[in-house]
Image: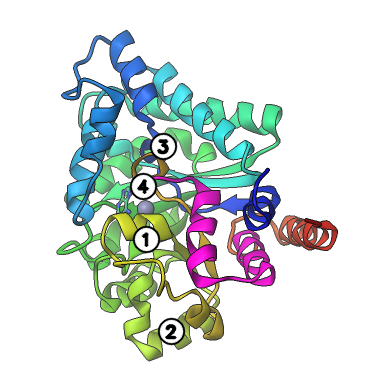
Amino acid sequence: MLPTLEKFIAGMPKAELHLHIEGTFEPELMFEIARRNKRKIRFNSVEEVKEAYKFNNLQEFLDIYYEGANVLIEERDFYDLTWAYLQKVHAQHVVHVEIFFDPQTHTDRGIAFATAINGIHQALEDGEKQLGISFKLIMCFLRHLPEEAAFQTLAEAMPFKEWIYGIGLDSSEMGHPPSKFERVFEKARQEGFVVMAHAGEEGPAEYIWEALNLLHVARIDHGNRCLDDEKLVQVLAERQIALTLCPLSNLELKVVQTLDGYPIQQMLDNDLLITINSDDPAYFGGYINENYLGIARPLNLSKETLAQLAKNSFRASFLSEEEKDRMIAKVDAYCASFTI
Ligand code: ADE
Ligand code: ZN
Protein backbone atom coordinates (compact mmCIF):
# COMPACT_ATOMS: atom_id res chain seq x y z
CA MET A 1 0.00 0.00 0.00
CA LEU A 2 1.34 3.40 -0.99
CA PRO A 3 1.44 6.07 1.70
CA THR A 4 -1.31 8.68 1.23
CA LEU A 5 0.85 11.43 -0.27
CA GLU A 6 2.40 9.07 -2.78
CA LYS A 7 -1.02 7.71 -3.67
CA PHE A 8 -2.43 11.20 -4.11
CA ILE A 9 0.38 12.23 -6.45
CA ALA A 10 0.36 8.93 -8.33
CA GLY A 11 -3.33 9.08 -9.22
CA MET A 12 -3.53 12.75 -10.14
CA PRO A 13 -3.96 13.58 -13.86
CA LYS A 14 -0.90 15.50 -15.03
CA ALA A 15 0.83 16.90 -18.10
CA GLU A 16 4.57 16.72 -18.66
CA LEU A 17 5.98 19.77 -20.44
CA HIS A 18 9.74 19.43 -20.08
CA LEU A 19 11.04 16.07 -21.15
CA HIS A 20 13.92 15.19 -23.47
CA ILE A 21 13.11 11.89 -25.13
CA GLU A 22 16.82 11.06 -25.30
CA GLY A 23 16.87 11.57 -21.53
CA THR A 24 14.44 8.68 -21.01
CA PHE A 25 16.96 6.14 -22.28
CA GLU A 26 17.07 3.57 -19.46
CA PRO A 27 20.31 1.54 -19.28
CA GLU A 28 18.43 -1.75 -19.82
CA LEU A 29 17.00 -0.54 -23.13
CA MET A 30 20.36 1.04 -24.03
CA PHE A 31 22.06 -2.34 -23.73
CA GLU A 32 19.33 -4.06 -25.71
CA ILE A 33 19.47 -1.55 -28.58
CA ALA A 34 23.29 -1.51 -28.56
CA ARG A 35 23.27 -5.31 -28.85
CA ARG A 36 20.87 -5.45 -31.78
CA ASN A 37 22.72 -2.62 -33.56
CA LYS A 38 26.10 -4.22 -32.80
CA ARG A 39 27.36 -1.05 -31.12
CA LYS A 40 29.74 -0.99 -28.18
CA ILE A 41 29.02 0.86 -24.95
CA ARG A 42 31.91 1.55 -22.63
CA PHE A 43 30.07 0.05 -19.63
CA ASN A 44 29.81 -3.64 -18.84
CA SER A 45 26.57 -3.67 -16.93
CA VAL A 46 23.47 -1.68 -16.03
CA GLU A 47 24.96 -1.18 -12.55
CA GLU A 48 28.13 0.30 -14.02
CA VAL A 49 26.08 2.73 -16.08
CA LYS A 50 24.08 3.81 -13.06
CA GLU A 51 27.28 4.23 -11.10
CA ALA A 52 28.52 6.67 -13.77
CA TYR A 53 25.43 8.86 -13.35
CA LYS A 54 26.98 11.20 -10.83
CA PHE A 55 27.25 14.76 -12.07
CA ASN A 56 28.74 17.98 -10.77
CA ASN A 57 27.17 20.20 -13.40
CA LEU A 58 25.15 20.28 -16.63
CA GLN A 59 28.15 19.64 -18.91
CA GLU A 60 29.18 16.45 -17.12
CA PHE A 61 25.67 15.14 -17.65
CA LEU A 62 25.46 16.24 -21.29
CA ASP A 63 28.69 14.40 -22.15
CA ILE A 64 27.27 11.08 -21.00
CA TYR A 65 23.77 11.81 -22.36
CA TYR A 66 25.08 12.40 -25.89
CA GLU A 67 27.21 9.27 -25.62
CA GLY A 68 24.17 7.18 -24.67
CA ALA A 69 22.23 8.45 -27.69
CA ASN A 70 24.94 7.09 -30.02
CA VAL A 71 23.39 3.63 -30.08
CA LEU A 72 20.11 4.92 -31.56
CA ILE A 73 20.38 4.06 -35.25
CA GLU A 74 17.14 2.70 -36.69
CA GLU A 75 13.62 4.12 -36.75
CA ARG A 76 12.61 1.25 -34.51
CA ASP A 77 15.11 2.42 -31.84
CA PHE A 78 13.48 5.84 -31.66
CA TYR A 79 10.09 4.17 -31.57
CA ASP A 80 11.07 1.84 -28.72
CA LEU A 81 12.61 4.69 -26.74
CA THR A 82 9.47 6.81 -27.04
CA TRP A 83 7.10 3.92 -26.47
CA ALA A 84 8.92 2.91 -23.27
CA TYR A 85 8.56 6.47 -21.96
CA LEU A 86 4.84 6.61 -22.80
CA GLN A 87 4.13 3.33 -21.07
CA LYS A 88 6.01 4.48 -18.01
CA VAL A 89 4.17 7.76 -17.68
CA HIS A 90 0.82 6.22 -18.54
CA ALA A 91 1.23 4.25 -15.34
CA GLN A 92 1.92 7.57 -13.58
CA HIS A 93 -1.35 9.15 -14.80
CA VAL A 94 0.26 11.51 -17.28
CA VAL A 95 -2.42 12.28 -19.86
CA HIS A 96 -0.66 14.86 -22.03
CA VAL A 97 3.02 15.20 -23.01
CA GLU A 98 4.99 17.92 -24.76
CA ILE A 99 8.31 16.30 -25.45
CA PHE A 100 11.62 17.53 -26.82
CA PHE A 101 13.90 15.80 -29.23
CA ASP A 102 17.41 16.88 -30.29
CA PRO A 103 17.71 16.15 -34.04
CA GLN A 104 21.32 17.40 -34.24
CA THR A 105 22.42 14.73 -31.75
CA HIS A 106 21.44 12.23 -34.43
CA THR A 107 21.98 14.00 -37.76
CA ASP A 108 25.56 14.90 -36.71
CA ARG A 109 26.25 11.15 -36.48
CA GLY A 110 24.84 10.48 -39.93
CA ILE A 111 21.35 9.40 -38.84
CA ALA A 112 18.69 10.91 -41.11
CA PHE A 113 16.33 13.47 -39.60
CA ALA A 114 13.48 11.31 -40.95
CA THR A 115 14.69 8.21 -39.10
CA ALA A 116 14.52 9.92 -35.72
CA ILE A 117 11.25 11.78 -36.22
CA ASN A 118 9.42 8.89 -37.91
CA GLY A 119 10.12 6.61 -34.96
CA ILE A 120 9.23 9.19 -32.31
CA HIS A 121 6.10 10.38 -34.11
CA GLN A 122 4.77 6.85 -34.71
CA ALA A 123 5.15 5.98 -31.03
CA LEU A 124 3.37 9.22 -30.05
CA GLU A 125 0.50 8.41 -32.42
CA ASP A 126 0.24 4.90 -30.98
CA GLY A 127 0.39 6.33 -27.47
CA GLU A 128 -2.53 8.59 -28.22
CA LYS A 129 -4.58 5.73 -29.68
CA GLN A 130 -3.68 2.98 -27.24
CA LEU A 131 -2.93 4.87 -24.02
CA GLY A 132 -5.00 8.02 -24.49
CA ILE A 133 -1.97 10.32 -24.07
CA SER A 134 -2.22 13.46 -26.21
CA PHE A 135 1.02 15.04 -27.36
CA LYS A 136 2.98 17.86 -28.94
CA LEU A 137 6.48 17.31 -30.31
CA ILE A 138 9.09 20.05 -29.86
CA MET A 139 12.40 20.12 -31.70
CA CYS A 140 15.36 21.67 -29.89
CA PHE A 141 18.44 23.32 -31.32
CA LEU A 142 21.69 22.46 -29.56
CA ARG A 143 23.02 25.79 -28.34
CA HIS A 144 26.68 24.69 -28.16
CA LEU A 145 26.59 24.43 -31.97
CA PRO A 146 26.64 27.48 -34.29
CA GLU A 147 23.47 29.30 -35.31
CA GLU A 148 24.17 28.22 -38.88
CA ALA A 149 23.69 24.58 -37.84
CA ALA A 150 20.33 25.51 -36.31
CA PHE A 151 19.27 27.11 -39.60
CA GLN A 152 20.24 23.89 -41.37
CA THR A 153 18.22 21.84 -38.89
CA LEU A 154 15.21 24.11 -39.34
CA ALA A 155 15.43 23.53 -43.09
CA GLU A 156 15.61 19.76 -42.56
CA ALA A 157 12.53 19.95 -40.35
CA MET A 158 10.33 21.63 -42.94
CA PRO A 159 9.07 18.43 -44.64
CA PHE A 160 7.87 17.35 -41.16
CA LYS A 161 6.33 20.67 -40.20
CA GLU A 162 2.94 19.11 -39.51
CA TRP A 163 4.47 16.92 -36.83
CA ILE A 164 6.49 19.59 -35.04
CA TYR A 165 4.58 21.97 -32.82
CA GLY A 166 7.36 24.05 -31.40
CA ILE A 167 11.05 24.85 -31.30
CA GLY A 168 13.21 24.87 -28.18
CA LEU A 169 16.82 25.55 -27.24
CA ASP A 170 18.88 23.23 -25.04
CA SER A 171 22.37 21.86 -24.24
CA SER A 172 25.28 23.78 -22.62
CA GLU A 173 23.86 27.07 -21.39
CA MET A 174 26.86 29.04 -20.11
CA GLY A 175 28.53 31.00 -22.90
CA HIS A 176 25.67 30.25 -25.32
CA PRO A 177 23.06 32.94 -24.62
CA PRO A 178 19.71 33.07 -26.39
CA SER A 179 20.96 36.10 -28.35
CA LYS A 180 23.17 33.71 -30.36
CA PHE A 181 19.97 32.27 -31.89
CA GLU A 182 17.91 35.41 -32.39
CA ARG A 183 17.74 35.16 -36.18
CA VAL A 184 16.95 31.46 -36.43
CA PHE A 185 14.21 31.83 -33.82
CA GLU A 186 12.75 34.71 -35.81
CA LYS A 187 12.66 32.45 -38.87
CA ALA A 188 11.07 29.66 -36.82
CA ARG A 189 8.34 32.01 -35.61
CA GLN A 190 7.74 33.21 -39.17
CA GLU A 191 7.23 29.58 -40.13
CA GLY A 192 4.52 29.38 -37.48
CA PHE A 193 6.31 27.47 -34.74
CA VAL A 194 5.71 28.25 -31.08
CA VAL A 195 9.10 28.82 -29.42
CA MET A 196 10.61 28.24 -25.99
CA ALA A 197 14.12 28.03 -24.54
CA HIS A 198 16.05 26.58 -21.64
CA ALA A 199 17.19 29.63 -19.70
CA GLY A 200 18.29 30.37 -16.16
CA GLU A 201 19.15 26.76 -15.34
CA GLU A 202 22.88 27.43 -14.87
CA GLY A 203 22.87 30.71 -16.79
CA PRO A 204 21.98 34.11 -15.31
CA ALA A 205 18.64 35.94 -15.18
CA GLU A 206 19.90 37.98 -18.14
CA TYR A 207 19.53 34.89 -20.35
CA ILE A 208 15.85 34.71 -19.36
CA TRP A 209 15.41 38.37 -20.38
CA GLU A 210 17.04 37.54 -23.72
CA ALA A 211 14.76 34.54 -24.23
CA LEU A 212 11.76 36.79 -23.62
CA ASN A 213 12.84 39.90 -25.49
CA LEU A 214 14.91 38.48 -28.35
CA LEU A 215 13.48 35.00 -28.94
CA HIS A 216 9.89 35.87 -27.91
CA VAL A 217 9.40 32.58 -26.11
CA ALA A 218 6.04 31.27 -24.96
CA ARG A 219 7.64 29.33 -22.07
CA ILE A 220 10.92 29.22 -20.19
CA ASP A 221 12.42 25.80 -19.51
CA HIS A 222 13.83 25.76 -15.97
CA GLY A 223 14.07 29.50 -15.27
CA ASN A 224 15.23 29.00 -11.67
CA ARG A 225 17.53 32.00 -11.79
CA CYS A 226 14.65 34.44 -12.39
CA LEU A 227 14.49 34.80 -8.63
CA ASP A 228 17.72 36.82 -8.78
CA ASP A 229 15.81 39.62 -10.53
CA GLU A 230 12.68 41.12 -8.99
CA LYS A 231 11.62 42.95 -12.14
CA LEU A 232 11.94 39.75 -14.17
CA VAL A 233 9.74 37.85 -11.71
CA GLN A 234 7.16 40.60 -12.05
CA VAL A 235 7.20 40.43 -15.86
CA LEU A 236 7.01 36.61 -15.93
CA ALA A 237 4.07 36.75 -13.52
CA GLU A 238 2.23 39.53 -15.36
CA ARG A 239 2.60 37.77 -18.69
CA GLN A 240 2.00 34.33 -17.15
CA ILE A 241 5.03 32.94 -18.99
CA ALA A 242 5.30 29.42 -17.58
CA LEU A 243 8.46 28.02 -16.04
CA THR A 244 8.95 24.27 -16.53
CA LEU A 245 10.83 23.34 -13.36
CA CYS A 246 12.65 20.02 -12.94
CA PRO A 247 13.50 19.44 -9.27
CA LEU A 248 15.39 16.13 -9.47
CA SER A 249 17.37 17.39 -12.46
CA ASN A 250 18.29 20.53 -10.51
CA LEU A 251 19.42 18.40 -7.59
CA GLU A 252 21.46 15.98 -9.68
CA LEU A 253 23.12 18.77 -11.71
CA LYS A 254 23.85 20.82 -8.58
CA VAL A 255 21.67 23.72 -9.67
CA VAL A 256 20.37 23.38 -6.09
CA GLN A 257 22.20 21.64 -3.26
CA THR A 258 19.10 20.12 -1.61
CA LEU A 259 15.36 20.08 -2.29
CA ASP A 260 14.59 21.37 1.23
CA GLY A 261 14.78 24.94 0.06
CA TYR A 262 13.30 24.46 -3.41
CA PRO A 263 11.45 27.76 -3.93
CA ILE A 264 7.99 26.44 -4.87
CA GLN A 265 6.13 28.56 -2.33
CA GLN A 266 8.13 31.69 -3.11
CA MET A 267 7.36 31.26 -6.81
CA LEU A 268 3.66 30.62 -6.21
CA ASP A 269 3.48 33.60 -3.86
CA ASN A 270 4.91 35.69 -6.69
CA ASP A 271 2.17 34.44 -9.06
CA LEU A 272 4.62 32.58 -11.27
CA LEU A 273 3.04 29.90 -13.46
CA ILE A 274 5.29 27.01 -12.41
CA THR A 275 5.08 23.36 -13.44
CA ILE A 276 6.85 20.18 -12.31
CA ASN A 277 8.63 17.97 -14.85
CA SER A 278 11.29 15.32 -15.11
CA ASP A 279 13.74 16.62 -17.80
CA ASP A 280 15.86 13.44 -18.25
CA PRO A 281 14.29 10.87 -15.94
CA ALA A 282 16.57 7.94 -16.81
CA TYR A 283 19.56 10.00 -15.65
CA PHE A 284 18.14 11.83 -12.64
CA GLY A 285 16.47 9.05 -10.69
CA GLY A 286 12.82 9.66 -11.32
CA TYR A 287 9.90 10.28 -13.62
CA ILE A 288 7.22 12.88 -13.02
CA ASN A 289 5.68 11.39 -9.87
CA GLU A 290 9.09 11.10 -8.24
CA ASN A 291 9.65 14.78 -9.04
CA TYR A 292 6.37 15.79 -7.37
CA LEU A 293 7.20 13.57 -4.41
CA GLY A 294 10.78 14.85 -4.31
CA ILE A 295 9.53 18.32 -3.40
CA ALA A 296 6.29 17.37 -1.65
CA ARG A 297 8.04 15.60 1.22
CA PRO A 298 10.80 18.04 2.20
CA LEU A 299 8.62 21.09 1.61
CA ASN A 300 5.61 19.54 3.28
CA LEU A 301 3.41 20.61 0.38
CA SER A 302 -0.34 20.39 0.87
CA LYS A 303 -2.63 18.45 -1.46
CA GLU A 304 -4.01 21.82 -2.63
CA THR A 305 -0.55 22.98 -3.65
CA LEU A 306 0.20 19.72 -5.43
CA ALA A 307 -3.12 19.95 -7.25
CA GLN A 308 -2.30 23.55 -8.16
CA LEU A 309 0.95 22.36 -9.75
CA ALA A 310 -0.92 19.69 -11.72
CA LYS A 311 -3.49 22.25 -12.87
CA ASN A 312 -0.64 24.57 -13.86
CA SER A 313 0.76 21.79 -16.05
CA PHE A 314 -2.40 21.97 -18.15
CA ARG A 315 -2.71 25.76 -17.97
CA ALA A 316 0.89 26.11 -19.23
CA SER A 317 0.50 23.51 -21.97
CA PHE A 318 -0.20 24.12 -25.66
CA LEU A 319 -3.61 22.47 -25.44
CA SER A 320 -6.62 24.52 -26.56
CA GLU A 321 -8.36 26.63 -23.88
CA GLU A 322 -11.29 24.17 -23.91
CA GLU A 323 -9.00 21.20 -23.40
CA LYS A 324 -7.16 22.99 -20.61
CA ASP A 325 -10.42 23.75 -18.80
CA ARG A 326 -11.56 20.15 -19.23
CA MET A 327 -8.31 18.77 -17.78
CA ILE A 328 -8.27 21.25 -14.90
CA ALA A 329 -11.82 20.20 -14.03
CA LYS A 330 -10.57 16.60 -13.96
CA VAL A 331 -7.87 17.52 -11.43
CA ASP A 332 -10.51 19.23 -9.27
CA ALA A 333 -12.79 16.19 -9.51
CA TYR A 334 -9.88 13.92 -8.58
CA CYS A 335 -9.10 16.01 -5.49
CA ALA A 336 -12.72 16.11 -4.42
CA SER A 337 -13.06 12.34 -4.70
CA PHE A 338 -9.67 11.44 -3.20
CA THR A 339 -9.95 9.46 -0.02
CA ILE A 340 -7.20 7.80 1.97
N1 ADE B 1 19.41 18.54 -22.63
C1 ADE B 1 18.88 17.55 -21.91
N2 ADE B 1 18.69 17.94 -20.65
C2 ADE B 1 19.10 19.22 -20.56
C3 ADE B 1 19.13 20.18 -19.53
N3 ADE B 1 18.72 19.90 -18.28
N4 ADE B 1 19.62 21.40 -19.80
C4 ADE B 1 20.05 21.68 -21.03
N5 ADE B 1 20.03 20.83 -22.03
C5 ADE B 1 19.55 19.60 -21.81
ZN1 ZN C 1 15.75 20.20 -20.24
**Magenta range:** 285-314
Q: What is the three-letter code of the residue carrying label 3? A: Thr
Say what secondary structure mark 1 lies in: strand
Q: Is residue 119 magenta?
A: no
At 78% from the left and 61% from the top, the residue drawn is: 335
Q: Quadrant of the N terminus?
A: top right
| Mark carried by residue 70 | none
Mark 2 / mark 3, whichever is N-terminal: 3
Between the C-alphas of marks 2 and 1, the distance is 17 Å
Mark 2 / mark 1, whichever is N-terminal: 1
Q: Nearer the viewer, mark 4 or mark 1?
A: 4
At 39% from the left and 22% from the top, the residue drawn is: 29
Q: Are marks 4 and 1 in contact (CB under 8 Å)?
A: no
Determine which residue is flagged by label 2. 233
Between the C-alphas of marks 3 and 1, the distance is 20 Å
Quadrant of res 339: bottom right
Q: Are marks 2 and 1 in contact (CB under 8 Å)?
A: no
Q: Do we see residue 144 in this rendering?
A: no
Between the C-alphas of marks 4 and 2, the distance is 27 Å
| Mark carried by residue 284 | 4
Residue 253 at x, y percent in the picture: 27, 56
Mark 4 / mark 3, whichever is N-terminal: 3
- Residues packed near mark 2 inside 10 Å, few (<14), some (14 to 19) or many (20 plus): many
Between the C-alphas of marks 2 and 3, the distance is 31 Å
Say what secondary structure mark 4 lies in: helix
